[in-house]
Image (cartoon, rainbow, N blue to C red):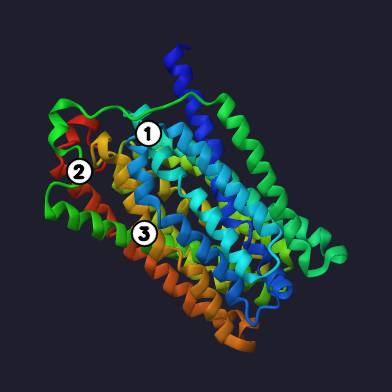
């Protein structure tokens, strides 16, 4: 293997490892909501789910600024520094004596996590201008691992410790995951090569400072971002609502709820690179296919017996989660390399801020159910709405395709969006 190929491969797998930690911290609290409510003596579970919403707002809000940095400075340093802040936020959360301190800790964790996606996605797209979907799919295995490990580990550890620690049992897994992230930061700094964005080519110099040169392109980008925020809302809600649904309506404890939620992400370790590779020969077709299948699975979820939760989550995750590397590849191939960090940062700022309000919203929706929250039928309308959101998110695909055609990038990356 040549030095260049070795560098690309090592960089891809290290980015995937950081991807795992980034998403561990997004989902590890989900099985712990009811324990946190008891420990902090919250009036409702909505205050616990709001912690994840606040974390995700802090995660998405700085994304454009992180994209600006990703287009100008060392992406390796951004990735390592971001993971360190993310991990330290979790360490602080484990020791939070009250709700105000917990909110401050998740804000720190969220800001740290915001360093990852603009830098990592732009880096992978630059390293792999051909086969971008497959490369992002391989990096997406890290997300699958993180999404899988987060809830299953935190739920298992909290349930194991609850007889001794009571409601405070949620703190140990949070601390352990935070310390592990600090260790991973040290290893990443040692193993990763420094990486800087490529300078803009002379032919693009006059547009290097502009994300989109025309109002029409801005409109298409914002419309696509808003459309995919519906997908993000539904995907995030499937985690938080799934945890509350299984524990309230089907009597799961934190460990079994974490195990069920982890099923969403286990199969995506296979589907992310698989569909990412297939989409390099037909991006819109494959992305639309997996999302349409996800629509049906979300709609049917509250209607099946509790024993079907894990296999249904596995199937849903196999298809739904694979849409992320495909959409990211479509976005990266729609714009020049010189602005990819900023474009992706703005994309996840718009979509992520709206999409991740779901944690707080579904928590409040369950609170308002009162005693009806113990009946599966009470959730039919909520899951039907989530299915509709995924369906409407498909409107984002023609927006990205139109951007690419108007940016005249088809000749560079090939007709992979068809």
Q: Which residue is mark 1?
A: 73
10 Å crowding of disc 3: few (<14), some (14-19), many (20+): many
> Which residue is painted at 41% across and 52% down in the image?
290
Q: Residue furthest right?
A: 164
Q: Quadrant of residue 68?
A: top left
> Which residue is painted at 58% across and 67% down in the image?
242
Of callouts 3 and 1, the N-terminal one: 1
> Which residue is painted at 53% across and 45% down in the image?
143
Is 402 placed left or right of 274 in the picture?
Answer: left
2 and 1 marks in contact (CB < 8 Å): no
- For mark 2, give the secondary structure: helix
Q: Nearer the viewer, residue 180 or 131?
A: 180
- For mark 3, give the secondary structure: helix
Q: Which residue is mark 2?
A: 404
Q: Residue furthest bottom?
A: 371
Q: Which residue is mark 3?
A: 351
Of callouts 3 and 2, the N-terminal one: 3
Image position, residue 401 (x, y; %)? 22, 47
> Which residue is painted at 45% across and 64% down in the image?
356
Image position, residue 353 (x, y; %)? 40, 62
3 and 1 marks in contact (CB < 8 Å): no
Q: Quadrant of residue 18?
A: top right
Image position, residue 239 (x, y; %)? 56, 63
Q: Nearer the viewer, residue 366 or 107?
A: 107
Q: CA distance from mark 3 to mark 1?
A: 25 Å
- Pick the quarter of the image with the C terminus: top left
């Amino acid at each position: 293997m040549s030095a260049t190929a070795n560098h690309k491969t090592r960089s891809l797998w290290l980015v995937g490892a950081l991807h795992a930690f980034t998403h561990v911290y997004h989902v590890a609290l989900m099985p712990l909501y009811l324990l946190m409510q008891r420990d902090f003596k919250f009036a409702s579970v909505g205050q616990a789910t709001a912690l994840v919403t606040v974390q995700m707002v802090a995660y998405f809000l700085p994304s454009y600024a992180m994209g600006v940095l990703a287009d100008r400075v060392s992406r390796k340093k951004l990735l390592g520094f971001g993971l360190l802040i993310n991990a330290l936020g979790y360490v602080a959360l484990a020791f939070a004596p009250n709700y105000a301190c917990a909110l401050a800790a998740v804000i720190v964790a969220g800001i740290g996590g915001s360093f990852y996606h603009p830098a990592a996605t732009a880096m992978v797209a630059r390293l792999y201008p051909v086969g971008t979907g497959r490369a992002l799919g391989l990096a997406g295995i890290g997300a699958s691992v993180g999404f899988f490990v987060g809830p299953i580990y935190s739920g298992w550890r909290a349930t194991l410790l609850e007889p001794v620690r009571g409601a405070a049992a949620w703190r140990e897994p949070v601390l352990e995951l935070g310390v592990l992230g600090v260790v991973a930061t040290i290893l990443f700094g040692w193993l990763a090569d420094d990486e800087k964005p490529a300078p803009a080519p002379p032919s693009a110099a006059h547009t290097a400072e502009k994300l989109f040169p025309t109002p029409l392109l801005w409109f298409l980008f914002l419309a696509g971002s808003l459309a995919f925020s519906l997908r993000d809302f539904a995907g995030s809600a499937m985690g938080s609502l799934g945890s509350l649904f299984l524990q309230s309506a089907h009597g799961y404890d934190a460990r079994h709820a974490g195990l069920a939620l982890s099923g969403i992400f286990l199969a995506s370790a296979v589907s992310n690179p698989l569909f990412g590779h297939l989409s390099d020969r037909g991006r819109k077709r494959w992305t639309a296919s997996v999302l349409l299948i996800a629509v049906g699975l979300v709609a049917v979820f509250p209607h099946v017996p509790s024993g079907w939760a894990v296999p249904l989550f596995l199937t849903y995750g196999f298809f739904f989660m694979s849409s992320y590397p495909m959409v990211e590849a479509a976005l990266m191939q729609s714009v020049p390399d010189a602005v990819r960090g900023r474009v992706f940062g703005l994309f996840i700022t718009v979509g992520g801020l709206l999409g991740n309000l779901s944690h707080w919203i579904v928590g409040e929706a369950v609170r308002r159910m009162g005693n009806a929250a113990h009946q599966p039928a009470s959730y039919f309308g909520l899951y039907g709405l989530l299915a509709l959101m995924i369906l409407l998110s498909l409107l984002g695909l023609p927006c990205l395709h139109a951007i690419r055609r108007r940016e005249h990038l088809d000749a560079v990356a090939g007709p992979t969006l068809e």
